[in-house]
Image: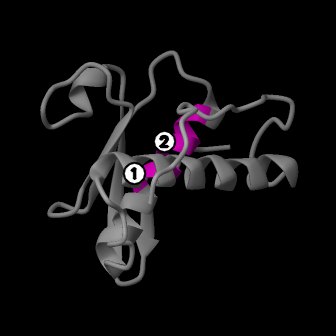
Amino acid sequence: MDLPNEIRLFNTTYKITYHDEAHEVCSKKEKRMRGEVSHQDCTIRVHKENRPYPEIIRTVWHELLHAVQDQIRGWAFFKDEDSEEHFIDLCSLAIVNILTQNKMCFDPDHEIKPRVSRQMDL
């Protein structure tokens, strides 16, 4: 399945670009970033080099959830940025799991596990 180059969310189109180098993804040039959304430019940048397709799609969904949050401003109940990141990471995991389990997207035999194993503190 092809990777999306743009996604329409409400009245906004987010352009999605894929990069071989992790430092090309982050506006702060950090090498550990897998993806980043720019709400001002309506762009999503994703690191793709040496990552399986399901993980790349999970990163796309993760960044899209940040875009949703920015668009609707409805998740202001998080105590801090880490709680928000953890919640969004779990949501992206759930979305990819639904797509996988229902054979709607990619190889259902590729197991995806949460990146974070701590409890969410809302």
Front-most of residues 29 and 105? 29
| SS category of the residue bearing label 1 | helix
Q: Quadrant of residue 51?
A: top right
Front-most of residues 32 and 17? 32
- Camera-nearest label, 2 or 1: 1
Q: Classify 11 as above or below 89.
A: below
Q: Is residue 59 magenta?
A: yes
- The residue that label 2 is drawn on is 59
| SS category of the residue bearing label 2 | helix
Q: Classify 100 as above or below 48.
A: below
Q: Position of residue 41 (x, y in %)?
A: 17, 60
Residue drawn at x 81%, y 35% is 107
- Residue most toward the top? 50
- The residue that label 1 is drawn on is 83
Q: Residues within 10 Å of mark 2 (few under 14, many from 20)?
A: many
Helix, strand or loop: magenta stretch: helix
The span from disc 2 to disc 1 (Cα, nearest Å) is 17 Å
In this rendering, does residue 61 appear at all?
yes
Q: Position of residue 91 (x, y in %)?
A: 58, 55
Q: What amino acid type should be assigned to the residue bearing mark 1?
A: Ser
Residue drawn at x 31%, y 78% is 73
Q: Position of residue 33 (x, y in %)?
A: 32, 29
Give the mark nearer the N terminus: 2 vs 1.
Answer: 2
- Magenta stretch, residue numbers: 55-63
